[in-house]
Image (tube, grey):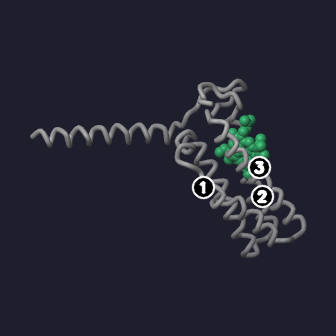
Amino acid sequence: MKLNKLALLSILLWLALAGVAAWFFVHGQTAPGTDGRKVVKLSPQERALVLMEMRGLLQSTHGVIEGLSREDLALVAKSARAGGMAAAADVNPALMAKLPLEFKQLGMSVHQGMDDIAMAAEQGEKSTVILQRMSNQLARCVACHSAWQLPMDAPDVPR
Ligand code: HEC
């Protein structure tokens, strides 16, 4: 009987913990920003990691556009691939818990979109169609940047 109660208690504790983890996975750690956007509260190191990934995405974007302008589909494929899912795979779980679900989904869809562009270029898709794909990608960059902010001095971030 005693053992049953202990088992029940541990199951309840486990469920509570799973609930907390799920809550963070969906909501992340956010706050209202100063310019109408929402703030994701990251430590300086996590912020630096996300911004580095961002600069990588800009570099990929440049390579894709450059490749398209020169009809160099190999350059398009190589540049897009560099910003694909593999570029996001090493993100740590602590950071994942701080990013809201919407942010993660949008971010992953951009990385997936880069892989799709790489594949399209490898298969010799028409430049105008690849350009249309890239335009869809940029719409996602714009959507996320107009919704979220990563300030240096995010409130309540442990330094
Ligand atoms: C899931 C959300 C999201 C997506 C998608 C996204 N970004 Fe960002 N990006 C951000 C946030 C948030 C910042 C920080 C903005 C701020 O604090 O004002 C940022 C910052 C940047 C920066 C500045 C980096 C630095 O060192 O300061 C660049 C460049 C950038 N993004 C490029 C891109 C490009 C290009 C794309 C699309 C191919 C893209 N981003 C898609 C969220 C996103």
| Residue where numbered disc 3 is placed | 55
Q: Quadrant where the N terminus lies?
A: top left
The furthest residue to the right: 70
Q: Residue drawn 82% across and 68% down? A: 75
Q: Position of residue 5 (x, y in %)?
A: 16, 38
Amino acid, disc 2 = Ser
The percent coordinates of residue 57 (x first, y second) are 74, 53
Residue labelled 2 has its Cβ within 8 Å of some atom of ligand 1: yes
Mark linked to residue 90: 1
In what element is the residue under mark 3? helix
**Quadrant field for ligand 1:** top right
Q: Is mark 2 in CB contact (under 8 Å) with mark 1? A: no
Question: Is the C-beta separation of discs 3 and 1 under 8 Å?
Answer: no
Beta carbon of the mark 1 residue lies under 8 A of ligand 1? no
Of residue 4 and residue 68, the one placed in the foreground of this image is 4
> Is residue 61 rendered to the left or right of residue 153?
right
Instruction: Estimate how packed mark 2 is, as few (under 14), some (14 to 19) or many (20 or more) residues with alpha carbons within 10 Å.
Output: many
Mark 2 — residue?
60
Q: Earlier in the sequence, mark 3 or mark 1?
A: 3
Q: Quadrant of residue 47?
A: top right
**The C terminus: image quadrant:** top right
Q: CA distance from mark 3 to mark 1?
A: 16 Å
